[in-house]
Image (cartoon, rainbow, N blue to C red):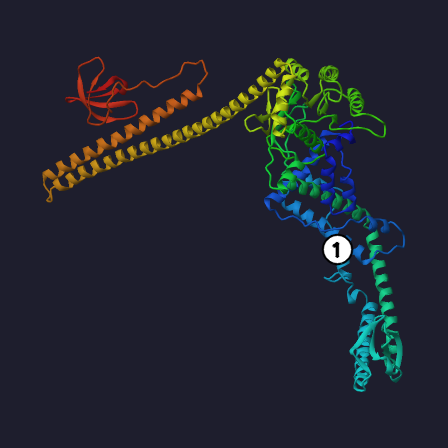
């Protein structure tokens, strides 16, 4: 984008979006950056930013385990590491530890998901996986992130001495307190702590009776705080040991700081990674708040098609009070690049215009937007708006003067890659004169090829939009029966302003409306009524069209389901029939074999041999039938394969000559030779010939010359 107009951002309430983003950030650096977010200049950068947010959104939606973003930025720590002899404080060490763990967990995550989330992986460039920093810090800090006793031999000795002194001090104190209490010198609240030292709460009357140093008294002076003398030297030693402990810890942290100084470049990359993921995470949280998605991206031109688009700020406000927000769907394309919206006041014209503008700025700023995923959005070099009452008291400009200056500014930037958003276009001056000037402006921006959404009440602008081939009228639907706007955009026709209907809705007396109508040209009222009637008829037609489309879809779905089930049942019926035929064959074979078994002679005699011969003949015939069926199937498959292989080939196809018979030619069949009356019995059959017995004479005859009789 060549130019970001801050005034347009304010008009479209982009500041609110930036404020939400900043509140979602963990780091101050990113919060400050996003509070000043602007559109990116390069469309490829926009797509990359959108992919970053979309990928992290997918991770969240899928419930994939992802490293927790609990970290603090390292700006001060990096500055300290670049200063020779500086020493990081313990909290700075802990920040670096958290950052190292987070980045290492990221490397492990992307190693596990190596075929996904390619955009997010690029945020790790400049860093590498290493446990060196963690391991070195783990030598110094325990699980509670305190310096370990054994971080050094000297520290361990000091802390042991501290423990010994504290035990002796407590032992001495308890003994002294017991003695003083026995003498009645001690108040009900027997002890207190002053300057990290245990002191006895002595009734002031007896303070001289206690051996020790007075370290203070109560506000009323009735109580005196006394340190037992026996502990004075020990407490002094303890103070010295605590100071020695502090110095030794600083020495240890200084060594650790020097170690980290050699990793300053890696730690600097940690800072960049933390901020990058903080930014992406804030954008994902915004997407969750407004139901944002990544639309389809149009790199070819500026054509945009918004489907079920919501104004994000309006949607959030309505959700807070449990009101429904109505989405809008419209497109800006080369054939309809200027959308002129008319209709009644408070009908939703301005919100529709702002929805287009705000979503476009968000999209080009790398933010997900509340639209259908089927929506498509292109890129503009300029997004410019003129919305609302913009009086300039400072420059002593009226609303109309300001708008003229704004329009003059627009004319210098209008091109085929400009998106103009003009609310209440042409208002602020005499309707006829201002309308004429507005029409000239409209013609000029049209000629320059720019895209735009314009709201107006001027009839000449509506008429001009109807005449220009790449401009299109639209209206906000208004229910004349209930006198309630429906907040829905209808593209294709201009809308009526419903001046008198809106006045009636707001309680203006009927007699005043009647008098007002009498002062208006009758043709004007009839035209307005005609437009409103057309709106109503179109609304009804669209509803019927929608219902018809839905019914057609349901009918088609039912038809597809019926055909699918019908095909399924036909297949099942065919399978069942084949199974029945197969079972019948088995049954017939079984019956025949049963007859052979029953008729088979039990004793050996000539009839037994004759019976076996008959059985053999039956088996031979049945086997021949099976082979013939298999052969026909194979031949049919070969013919099919040959036809497929030779499709489109001009060579003459070789086809096997069919056997001149409709009945199967089997062993035992009665046949005759084609064009003769000579008949015989088949003795055997092979692939091409059959052996035929003509009385006592046997002969081999080609199959194509035989007919089964």
Q: Position of residue 471 (x, y in %)?
A: 65, 17
- In the depicted view, which residue is nearer to us: 577 or 159? 159
- In the depicted view, which residue is nearer to us: 672 or 552? 552
Point out the image quarter for the C terminus: top left
Q: Position of residue 510 (x, y in %)?
A: 60, 25
Q: Which residue is mark 1?
A: 134
Q: Is residue 26 visible?
A: yes
Q: Is residue 124 visible?
A: no
Q: Quadrant of residue 456?
A: top right
- In the depicted view, which residue is nearer to us: 254 or 114? 254
Point out the image quarter for the N terminus: top right
Label 1 secondary element: helix
Q: Position of residue 164 (x, y in %)?
A: 80, 76
Q: Quadrant of residue 142?
A: bottom right
Q: Is residue 82 left or right of residue 140?
A: right
**Point 83% across, 79% down: residue:** 202
Count of picture labels: 1
Q: Position of residue 522 (x, y in %)?
A: 61, 14
Vertical relation: 218 (above or below) 682? below
Vertical relation: 214 (above or below) 83? below
Residue located farthest toward the bottom when viewing the structure as drawn:
183
Residue located farthest toward the front when viewing the structure as drawn:
511
Residue count near mark 1 (Cα–Cα under 10 Å), binned few <14, some 14–19, many ≥20:
some
Q: Is residue 96 left or right of residue 632?
A: right
Q: Is residue 28 left or right of residue 594?
A: right
């Amino acid at each position: 984008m060549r130019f970001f107009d801050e005034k347009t951002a304010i008009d479209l309430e982009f500041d609110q979006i930036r404020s939400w983003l900043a509140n979602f950030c963990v780091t101050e650096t990113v919060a400050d950056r996003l509070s000043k977010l602007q559109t990116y200049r390069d469309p490829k950068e926009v797509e990359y930013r959108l992919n970053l947010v979309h990928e992290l959104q997918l991770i969240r939606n899928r419930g994939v385990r992802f490293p927790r973003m609990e970290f603090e930025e390292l700006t001060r720590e990096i500055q300290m590491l670049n200063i020779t002899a500086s020493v990081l404080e313990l909290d700075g060490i802990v920040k670096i530890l958290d950052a190292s763990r987070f980045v290492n967990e990221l490397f492990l995550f992307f190693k596990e998901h190596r075929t996904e989330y390619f955009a997010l992986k690029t945020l790790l460039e400049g860093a590498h996986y290493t446990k060196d920093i963690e391991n070195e810090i783990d030598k110094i800090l325990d699980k509670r992130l305190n310096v370990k006793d054994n971080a050094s031999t000297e520290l361990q000795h000091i802390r042991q001495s501290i423990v010994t002194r504290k035990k002796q001090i407590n032992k001495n104190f308890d003994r002294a307190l017991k003695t003083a209490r026995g003498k009645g010198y001690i108040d009900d609240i027997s002890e207190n702590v002053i300057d990290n030292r245990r002191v006895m709460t002595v009734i002031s009357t007896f303070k001289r009776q206690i051996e020790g140093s007075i370290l203070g008294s109560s506000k009323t002076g009735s109580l005196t705080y006394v340190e037992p003398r026996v502990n004075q030297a020990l407490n002094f030693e303890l103070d010295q040991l605590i100071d020695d402990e502090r110095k030794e810890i600083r020495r240890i942290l200084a060594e650790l700081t020097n170690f980290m100084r050699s990793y300053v470049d890696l730690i600097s990359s940690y800072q960049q990674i933390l901020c990058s993921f903080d930014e992406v995470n804030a954008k994902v949280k915004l997407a969750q708040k407004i139901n944002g998605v990544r639309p389809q991206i149009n790199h070819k031109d500026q054509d945009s098609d918004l489907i079920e688009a919501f104004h994000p700020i309006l949607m959030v406000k309505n959700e807070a009070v449990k009101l429904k927000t109505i989405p809008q769907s419209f497109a800006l394309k080369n054939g309809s690049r200027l959308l002129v919206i008319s209709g009644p006041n408070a009908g939703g014209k301005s919100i529709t215009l702002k929805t287009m503008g705000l979503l476009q700025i968000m999209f080009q700023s790398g933010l997900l937007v509340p639209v259908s995923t089927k929506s498509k959005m292109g890129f503009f070099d300029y997004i410019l708006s003129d919305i609302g009452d913009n009086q300039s008291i400072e420059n002593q400009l009226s609303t109309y003067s300001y708008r003229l200056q704004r329009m003059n500014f627009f004319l210098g930037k209008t091109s085929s890659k400009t998106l103009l958003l003009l609310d209440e276009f042409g208002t602020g001056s005499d309707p006829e004169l201002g309308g004429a000037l507005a029409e000239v402006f409209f013609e000029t921006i049209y000629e320059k090829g720019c895209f735009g959404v314009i709201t107006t009440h001027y009839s000449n602008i509506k008429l001009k939009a109807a005449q220009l081939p790449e401009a299109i009228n639209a209206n906000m639907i208004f229910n004349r029966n209930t006198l309630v706007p429906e907040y829905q955009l209808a593209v294709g026709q201009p809308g009526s302003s419903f001046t008198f209907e809106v006045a009636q809705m707001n309680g203006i007396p009927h007699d005043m409306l009647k008098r007002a109508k009498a002062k208006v040209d009758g043709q004007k009222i009839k035209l307005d009524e005609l437009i409103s009637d057309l709106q109503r008829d179109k609304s009804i037609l669209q509803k019927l069209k929608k219902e018809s489309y839905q019914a057609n879809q349901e009918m088609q779905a039912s038809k597809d389901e019926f055909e699918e089930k019908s095909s399924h049942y036909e297949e099942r019926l065919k399978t069942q029939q084949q199974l029945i035929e197969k079972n019948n064959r088995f049954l017939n074979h079984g019956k025949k074999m049963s007859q052979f078994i029953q008729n088979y002679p039990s004793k050996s005699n000539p009839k037994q041999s004759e019976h076996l011969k008959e059985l053999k003949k039956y088996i031979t015939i049945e086997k021949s039938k099976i082979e013939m069926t298999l052969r026909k199937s194979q031949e049919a498959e070969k013919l099919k394969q040959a036809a497929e292989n030779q499709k489109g080939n001009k060579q003459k196809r070789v086809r096997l000559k069919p056997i001149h018979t409709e009945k199967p030619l089997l062993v035992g069949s009665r046949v005759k030779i084609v064009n003769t009356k000579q008949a015989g019995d088949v003795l055997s059959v092979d692939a091409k010939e059959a052996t035929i017995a003509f009385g006592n004479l046997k002969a081999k005859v080609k199959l194509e010359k035989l007919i089964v009789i």
